[in-house]
Amino acid sequence: MKLVFSIVFLSVSFSTFLPLAIARGGLNNSNPPGLEYGPRTGSRRHLFEDDESETRVDVAQGYMTNTELERAIKAFGQRCSNISRVYSIGESVNGVPLWVIEISDKPGEEEPEPAFKYIGNVHGDEPVGRELLMLLANWICDNYLKDPLATSIVDGVHLHILPSMNPDGFLLRRRGNANNIDLNRDFPDQFFPVNDYVNGRQPETRAIMKWLREIQFTASASLHGGALVANYPWDGTQDKRKNYFACPDDETFRFLASVYSGSHHNMSLSKEFDGGITNGASWYPIYGGMQDWNYIHAGCFELTLEISDIKWPIANELLTLWEYNKMSMLNLVASLIKTGVHGRIFSSDGGRPLPGFIVIKGINYTVQASRGIADYHRLLASGGRYEVTATAPGYKTKTTGIWLDKAGTNVDFVLDPNVNRGGIPLRSACECRWGTRSVIWDIHLEVYLLLIVIVGFLLFLCKRRTCSRLKQRQLSGPKRPVVV
């Protein structure tokens, strides 16, 4: 056994050509059997000259504790109540609330605006994100109506900030949660049957999935540490090999990743990653990640942002890291309204909103309009011509061409219902709302009439049977006097 440990130690010591910077990846006991992948690599360098300072002090010193973070979030909600609300999406394994800050000019209200979410501290030992997200929220609050970028974000986007997805891991100063599960391996995977059992997922994972069922996010980013790069889908490959594996919106994801990298102090100058961005599977494949799940199952374009070479830098580097990432974080959110095509889908018969679908020619991906007010937000790379098609069950499709330069564009679609030879709509789409949920009923007219006939026939049989029973009782029972 000692010989084995010695070999492992020597192999790590002499592998200087593979500097350790385990970021969103890394070996993990929750990986599916037979799937092996190595740590993501990157230079480990401090912002300041003193490279040994991290070993001389408690790395957690100067960071907010979970209790202090909760107080800071609630204090922000009170101080900036005119443009924010605070809510919880669930609890961690140990019962710590997963607090979220929503920033908008109309927080909590449904508007035809895109929604963006930032998630920090996915891994417990990568706490820079939770600190920077609180700095971001306070900067926007302090500069609303003063700075045009802050104002455009508040007025045009619903920004949701989850500073810590893994408060238990932070307290334990380890990567996994209280059950020692890597939360970035705990989501359903597109290639392999991992995490398909709902009750087997961690409460933090279930909270994220429930959150995305309740709010339709256009885009998202999770903040990690251990490297300096903007990562985009796909994260995994079907053959388990390390190679570039593009998703249908590869061009758009490269654009979004470049927005972050290009606005960063030095991310785009990386010597390891061209332009400071990388395809996840090209870096090395992972499975059960949150990023791919967002894109596949929630229609949300998510990036994984590695914002610090050191996973847990000393606290006096936080303000410098904030200055390095501030414009990147702001510009990424603002890109939701500065690019792409946005609008609503309506029915020509009455003008009611239609929760239809948006398809771009040449891109095998569908974006769904919201169920309530039927607004859609289709992110696209700037500098090209696109053919946009709107569809809805029971309605004729409509297509239009757009040119995206350096700004987004708005296109509303008014769809005509399909009709039969007699001019009667073949389908009717009505929106029935119970509480906060919208249920869309697409019913063929012929089916509707058939249902009426069936229900009428059942009522007739029921009435006939009831009358028959009453008649039998009258014949078998004692005669009663007739009352006039």
Image (cartoon, helix red, strand yellow):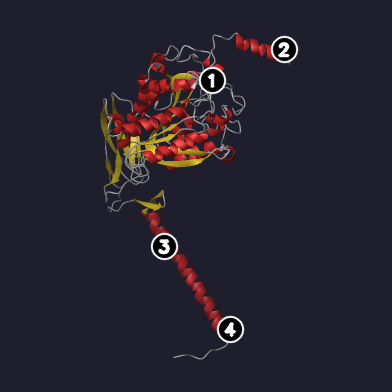
> Dot 4 surroundings within 10 Å: few (below 14), some, or many (20 or more)?
few
Task: Residue 11 in the image: state x and y as whole percent.
Answer: 63, 11
Q: On residue 453, which mark appears?
A: 3
| Residue carrying label 1 | 22
Tell me which amino acid carries mark 3. Answer: Val
Choose top left, top right, bottom left or bottom right for residue 111. Answer: top left
Q: Are marks 1 and 2 in contact (CB under 8 Å)?
A: no
| Disc ID at residue 476 | 4
| Label 1 – label 2 distance at C-alpha | 26 Å
Q: Viewer-nearest of labels 1 and 3?
A: 1
The answer for how far apart the CA atoms under marks 4 and 2 are is: 98 Å
Whole-percent x, y for residue 327 in the image? 35, 24
Q: Dot 1: few (<14), some (14–19), or many (≥20) neighbours within 10 Å?
A: many
Q: Which residue is mark 2?
A: 3
Residue 257 visible? The answer is no
Which is nearer the eye, 171 or 475? 171
- The quadrant in which residue 74 appears is top left
Seen in the image, is 22 located left or right of residue 336?
Answer: right
